[in-house]
Image (cartoon, coloured by chain):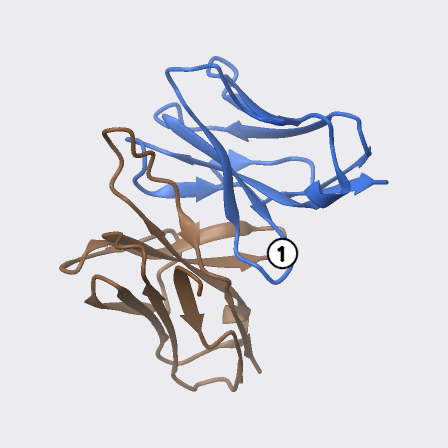
Amino acid sequence: DQQVKQNSPSLSVQEGRISILNCDYTNSMFDYFLWYKKYPAEGPTFLISISSIKDKNEDGRFTVFLNKSAKHLSLHIVPSQPGDSAVYFCAASRNTGNQFYFGTGTSLTVIP
Amino acid sequence: DADVTQTPRNRITKTGKRIMLECSQTKGHDRMYWYRQDPGLGLRLIYYSFDVKDINKGEISDGYSVSRQAQAKFSLSLESAIPNQTALYFCATSDIPGQGITGELFFGEGSRLTVL
């Protein structure tokens, strides 16, 4: 049973606009959430994380929002750039860093 | 050089053959993991190890075994490969979270396995 879900397999956005990637989870015990970015033929690379004690974390163009009551998190990329085109995975864990559960990924295409 | 190195990067084999995928890391992390990626299924955990004497099954361990030969080395074996084990396999490491360490995963570049 998929505990972390990304319901949009793909997303296309114009360069300069905002990209919003969504993720839902079912396990209320999850307390640590991460976003990873993956280019073809490469391993996923860590992008940004958020602890359940926060509702927002920002790092440059990337912001992650966490809504615990809705069991939902989102990644905002502003402004989007063509180099952001990749597959984005969200992941969650209990007890901050034990077993990680990944979503199925969203393929983002930023159109120049 | 990559901090997390996987070998081989690509392998084609036949049903019933024994296959070993190897992972080595220079990050000094205690925790190591093996994931597989399949289209539409994301990354699923096969096995993980929190130190040399600790091995744990993940979500999909059936048909796989692992060996933690040293802190820096974690290998994944398919004793008798079958076609539905065709996938992209990733090794990952993490530090122990706490005291400002967030414990995120660091991935290797992946090993693409095809079982005919």
- Residue A93 locus on image (x, y percent): 37, 35
- Would you say B9 lies left or right of A13 here? left
In the foreground, B79 or B27: B27
According to the rendering, which colour does chain B have?
Answer: brown
Q: Residue furthest left?
A: B53
Chain of the residue under label 1: B
A87, above or below A79, in the image:
below
Residue A61: name its quadrant.
Answer: top right
Chain rendered blue: A
Under circle 1, the secondary element is loop
Residue A101: name its quadrant.
Answer: top left
Residue A17: name its quadrant.
Answer: top right
- Residue B74 locus on image (x, y percent): 29, 66
In the foreground, B3 or A27: B3
**What residue is drawn where x is 44% and y is 85%?**
B16
B25, above or below A102, in the image:
below
- Would you say A110 lies left or right of A70 here? right
What amino acid type is highlighted by mark number 1? Pro
**What residue is drawn where x is 62% and y is 56%?**
B39
Q: Residue furthest front?
A: B1
- Residue A22 locus on image (x, y percent): 62, 29
Residue indicated by mark 1: B39
B80, above or below B112, in the image:
below
**What residue is drawn where x is 34% and y is 55%?**
B33
Quadrant holding the C terminus of chain A: top right
